[in-house]
Amino acid sequence: MADKVADLNGLKRFKKKVQECSSHQNRVEVVLRRLCEAGMAYAKDLYGDNSISVTYSIDGNGNGSIIASGEQIAYLEYGTGERGRGSYEGNLPTQDISFYSTRLGQDITVDGWTYSYAHEFDASFPKWNGITAKAQMWTTARWLRDNAAKIIREVAKE
C-alpha cells in the first residue's frame, strides 16, 4: 500500500488568514473601546458636577454606546420651558413621554419633547421659563465625529 502524504500548504494558508482576521478583529475592538472611552471622558467633562453618571457599553455586534444617566438628564440635554424652546441643535424625541406632573397633579402623556407642557394642557398655567439646552450628549457625538480619525490613527500607531 502506498504512503499518503498530506499537503499542509493549504492548511497553513488557512491558519494564516484566520490569524490575520483575529488580529484585525482585535484591532477593531481596541479602536471601538478607545472611541467609547474618549467619548465618555469628554461627556463627563461636559456634565461636570451635575450628578450625572456617564458610562459606555459595547454590544456583541461591534456597536458602542455612550450612556448618560441621571434624574435631570433629559432636561439638561434638551432644555425646558420658554428658554429651552429652539435652543437644542439636534433632533428632539418624537415618541410619547408619560410622567407624573406635580404642577398638574396627575399623570400625563405628551407627544414628543414638550417645552411648556402645563401651559399646553391648561392655558391658566403660565409658561415656564425653564433652562436652555446644554446638549452634552449631542456635543459629545459631534466631538467624536470630529476626532474619530485622530483617535483611530493613535490606535494604529500602537
Image (cartoon, rainbow, N blue to C red):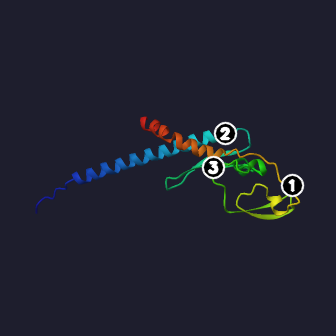
Q: Quadrant of the N terminus?
A: bottom left
- Helix, strand or loop for disc 3: strand
The residue under label 2 is 46
Query: How far apart are the two marked residues, 3 and 2, measured between alpha carbons?
Result: 13 Å
Query: How far apart are the two marked residues, 1 and 2, measured between alpha carbons?
Result: 31 Å
- Within 10 Å of disc 3 (Cα), the crowding (few <14, some 14-19, many 20+) is some
Front in this rendered view, residue 1 or 76: 76
- Helix, strand or loop for disc 2: helix
The residue under label 1 is 126
Amino acid type, residue under disc 1 in the picture? Pro
The residue under label 3 is 67
Q: How many marks?
A: 3
Give the mark nearer the N terminus: 3 vs 2. 2
Instruction: Name the residue furthest right.
Output: 124
Front in this rendered view, residue 123 or 117: 123
Amino acid type, residue under disc 2 in the picture? Leu
Front in this rendered view, residue 10 or 152: 152
Give the mark nearer the N terminus: 3 vs 1. 3
- Within 10 Å of disc 1 (Cα), the crowding (few <14, some 14-19, many 20+) is few
Left or right of 24? Residue 146 is right
* Residue 19: % across, % down: 35, 48
Q: Is residue 50 above or below residue 64?
A: above
* Residue 150: % across, % down: 48, 37
- Helix, strand or loop for disc 1: loop
Query: How far apart are the two marked residues, 3 and 1, measured between alpha carbons?
Result: 34 Å
Give the mark nearer the N terminus: 1 vs 2. 2
* Residue 98: % across, % down: 75, 63
Residue pictured at 83% horizontal, 54% vertical: 127
